[in-house]
């Protein structure tokens, strides 16, 4: 009996220690890039079976909390981290790494209209403020010559949960509309004066599909994947630009990243730039005490910045422009 | 022969004789302690939850005080929190659900307590109604979203277009809102109301029914003038218990109520409930928002505990308790 016990114990011990060189990285955070991250981590694990990454898409805010609390090796956030949040991280600094980017689109359900609806810069903030309430509003009609718009009430759909998508979308609206900036303002969860809330990108997408007349903001890859109609938006240069990988990348190319790599592209310039784009970040410690973790993260990040970028457009994300990649790689290599 | 067997079996039975007394005593002692501990730990758990939630709510209590309950703004961005739209949404959706579910539930209860159908068929009906309680909330939510909303939306828009001057119909339907939420909620609380009303109706003494029949009362008269008045307080208790359940319902409401923190008289306007806001906001909440959410939880807990207590008292008095549920 004793023998058996010892034997089985030994078996358990050897089972848990056998792949001693395997490293497991835990990460959690933003849901916005979760699809891409899952794909990356699966691909990376296939190429490097000794590294396993568990990623949980639990939301940017929760990701920051878990990272700060030391529960994860790195976090992910659509809103990077604020200075206050960085200060709360114990033992050493934080490296913010923009790893991918995405566009946020305005999807709608307007029966009978097949051509993409064009929305001017003064119109779509007004829709989300509840000032424009009909699809055949003169301002929308004027921007869409040759399109017959129905006499249909506009229902706004927004994210009911706090989200980085809301943060980036409202940051853009606040940048182009002083009225929106005054109230409700930009944030992860804002008080939209009109509309209905859905949980997550899928919740908003379902609301749009369900009720004719609904318009809402969702991530580009998501809208593409669920075959939602996407509005063509007027950018800072006054041009109407449809959401696409190219127009998103054009917007990102306008950005000059600062030293801490935290920049929000609230209103990109350039004729071909799609107006609502955002980077999304990994949050890493500057120093890791657990052996092997720093090297594993560095290798993973460098892989994601090179090979990983190629899978981004497949899933509706934007590959980072080359100058950005160079800057981020430099930051990755400072991790110890 | 019979005595012989019993004697021989008692010889090997450990529960008989000297040893039995000792063993059963220690067993009794241990068992009574185990039940004592289990019983009190339930009470302790409830207190612990209340204290923990209350403690986490302290920063918001300090900041807003009782003004929190009458504040109408829930603005995460500016860290201003007021619970009134949420309390309003919770109460209105629960009462609307109750208004639909009570007549239905009582009708089901009458149908299943009178002998309209053979007992076997009635039992199948009863089983089916009780099965409604076994359907997960999220399934109700999905059903409401994909089946109920497409029906309520055009109805709401029609009523708004033709009777828009009535405050109840003052806004066009934006899909999710009070109406679909209350409708689905009413089905969710139907089993509670039907089952408890049924047991209240069963308490009508057979002698009274027979007496009424002897006096020439029709079945109508017996139901309306004998059974229902006797069961009235039990039915009321059932409704209050249903109300308590409706107020705490989360997932289905988060999908159907529209999650808009506003106060509107219109049935078709989106609104929000405490439970739904909690479910949506906790993941990303930080700082004062967490405290405000905890304050809200505390209010919801106090409301549902109060309502359940009232229901239990009423049911206890009428003898139709929830024990057999």
Image: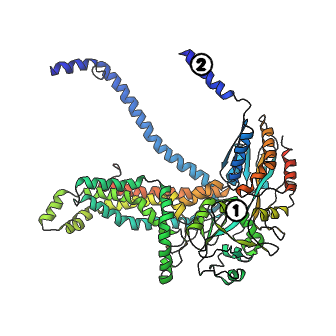
Residue A225 x, y percent position in the rendering: 65, 60
In front here: B272 or A123? A123
- On the image, numbered disc 2 is attached to which residue? A7
Rendered residue at 40%/68% (across/down): B99
Can residue A226 be seen here? The reply is yes
Q: Is residue B53 left or right of residue A218?
A: left
Which residue is disc 1 drawn over? A220
Q: Residues within 10 Å of mark 2 (few under 14, many from 20)?
A: few
Nearest the camera: A230 or B17? A230
Q: Dot 1 surroundings within 10 Å: few (below 14), some, or many (20 or more)?
A: many
Q: Is disc 1 placed on a helix, strand or loop? A: helix
Residue A231 x %, y %: 69, 71
Q: Position of residue B261 (x, y in %)?
A: 58, 67
**Helix, strand or loop under label 2:** helix
Give the mark, 1 or 2, whose residue is nearer the N terminus.
2
- Nearer to us in this view, B46 or B64: B46
Depicted A310 relative to depicted A300: above or below: below
């Amino acid at each position: 009996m004793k023998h058996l016990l010892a034997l089985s114990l030994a078996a358990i011990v050897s089972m848990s220690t056998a792949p001693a060189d395997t490293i497991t990285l835990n990460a959690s955070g933003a849901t916005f890039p979760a699809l891409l991250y899952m794909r990356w981590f699966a691909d990376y694990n296939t190429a490097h079976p000794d590294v396993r990454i568990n990623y949980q898409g639990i939301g940017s805010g929760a990701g920051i909390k878990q990272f700060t609390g030391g529960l994860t090796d790195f976090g992910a956030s659509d809103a990077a981290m604020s200075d206050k949040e960085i200060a709360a991280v114990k033992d050493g600094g934080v490296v913010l790494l923009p790893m991918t980017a995405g566009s946020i689109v305005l999807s709608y359900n307007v029966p009978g209209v097949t051509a993409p609806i064009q929305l001017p810069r003064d119109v779509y903030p007004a829709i989300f403020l509840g000032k424009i309430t009909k699809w055949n509003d003169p301002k929308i009609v004027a921007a869409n010559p040759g399109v017959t718009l129905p006499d249909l009430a506009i229902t706004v759909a927004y994210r009911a949960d706090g989200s980085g998508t809301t943060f980036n979308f409202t940051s853009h609206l606040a940048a182009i509309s002083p009225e929106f900036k005054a109230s409700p303002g930009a944030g992860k969860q804002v008080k939209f004066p009109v509309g209905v809330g859905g949980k997550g990108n899928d919740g908003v997408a379902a609301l749009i599909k369900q009720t004719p007349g609904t318009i809402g903001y969702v991530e580009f890859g998501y809208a593409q994947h669920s075959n939602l109609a996407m509005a063509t938006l007027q950018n800072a240069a006054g041009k109407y630009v449809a959401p696409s990988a190219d127009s998103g990348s054009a917007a990102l190319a306008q950005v000059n990243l600062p030293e801490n790599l935290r920049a929000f592209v609230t209103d990109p310039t350039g004729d071909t730039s799609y107006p609502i784009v955002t980077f999304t970040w990994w949050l890493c410690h500057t120093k890791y005490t657990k052996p092997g973790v720093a090297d594993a993260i560095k290798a993973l990040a460098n892989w994601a910045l090179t090979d990983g970028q190629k899978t981004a457009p497949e899933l509706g994300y934007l590959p980072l422009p080359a100058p950005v990649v160079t800057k981020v790689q430099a930051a990755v290599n400072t991790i110890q | 022969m019979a005595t012989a067997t019993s004697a021989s079996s008692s010889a090997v039975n450990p529960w008989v004789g000297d040893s039995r007394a000792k063993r059963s005593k220690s067993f009794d002692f241990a068992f009574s302690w185990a039940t004592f501990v289990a019983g009190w730990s339930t009470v302790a758990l409830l207190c612990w939850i209340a204290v923990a939630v209350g403690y986490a709510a302290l920063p918001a209590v300090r900041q807003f005080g009782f003004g929190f309950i009458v504040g109408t703004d829930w603005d995460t961005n500016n860290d201003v929190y007021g619970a009134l739209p949420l309390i309003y949404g919770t109460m209105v959706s629960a009462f609307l659900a109750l208004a639909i579910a009570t007549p239905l539930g009582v009708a089901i209860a009458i149908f299943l307590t009178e002998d309209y159908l053979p007992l076997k068929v009635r039992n199948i009906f009863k089983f089916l109604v009780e099965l409604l309680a076994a359907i997960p909330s999220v399934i109700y939510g999905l059903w409401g979203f994909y089946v109920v909303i497409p029906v309520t939306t055009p109805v709401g828009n029609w009523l708004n277009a033709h009777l828009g001057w009535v405050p109840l119909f003052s806004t066009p339907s934006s899909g999710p809102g009070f109406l679909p939420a209350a409708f689905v909620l009413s089905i969710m609380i139907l089993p509670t109301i039907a089952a408890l009303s049924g047991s209240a109706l069963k308490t009508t003494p057979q002698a009274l029914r027979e007496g009424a029949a002897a006096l020439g009362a029709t079945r109508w008269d017996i139901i309306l003038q004998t059974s229902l008045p006797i069961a009235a307080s039990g039915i009321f208790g059932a409704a209050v218990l249903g109300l308590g359940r409706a107020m705490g319902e989360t997932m289905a409401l988060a999908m159907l109520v529209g999650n808009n923190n506003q106060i509107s008289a219109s049935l078709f306007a989106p609104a929000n409930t405490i439970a739904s806001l909690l479910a949506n906001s906790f993941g990303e909440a930080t700082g004062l928002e967490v405290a405000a959410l905890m304050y809200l939880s505390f209010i919801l807990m106090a409301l549902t505990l109060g309502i359940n207590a009232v229901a239990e008292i009423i049911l206890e008095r009428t003898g139709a308790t929830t024990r057999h549920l």
